[in-house]
Image: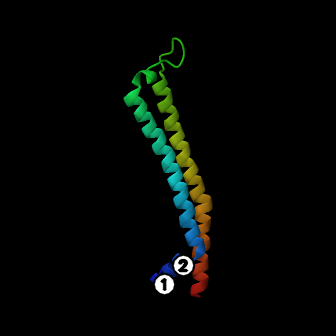
Amino acid sequence: MSSAMYERMRANPKFQELVSRRERFAWILAFIVLTMFYGFVMVVAFSPASLGQPIAEGSRVTVGVAVELFMFIFFWLLTALYVRRANTEFDALTQEIVKEAWKEQK
């Protein structure tokens, strides 16, 4: 593709919408992940005994292990959510932008 085509794509309002939506979504996910991760680190730093408690009477599994397992699974789900949205909404918008740029070139 030529640089003129790239400029047409960048000038397209749909491109600005794509960048804005993708950026907003990425920042929301980043905020969620960082809040959970650093929140857990803060609990480890300031209240480690609370994470060492068993989740039930006589259980060998502690609250810390359960929370970490939850976080691990939750982060995978967030990744799947991002991939799903990227493969549907973001890719569809990208294809529209490219098609419009090709039409303008002809």
Circle 1 residue: 4
Q: Amino acid at mark 1?
A: Ala
The image position of residue 48, as x and y in percent, is 40, 25
The image position of residue 62, as x and y in percent, is 47, 21
Report the front residue among 10 and 3. Answer: 10
Quadrant in which residue 56 is drawn: top right
- In the displayed structure image, the side of residue 39 where residue 93 appears, left or right: right
Q: Residue at x 53, y 37 (%)?
A: 73
Mark 2 or mark 1: name the one nearer the start of the chain. Answer: 1
Q: Residue at x 45, y 24 (%)?
A: 51
Q: Given contact means CB atoms under 8 Å apart, are the residues at marks 2 and 1 in contact?
A: no
Q: Secondary structure at mark 1?
A: helix
| Residue 33 higher or lower than 95, as above or below | above
Q: Secondary structure at mark 2?
A: helix
Mark 1 Cα within 10 Å, few/some/many (few <14, many 20+)? few
Circle 2 residue: 11
Q: Amino acid at mark 2?
A: Ala
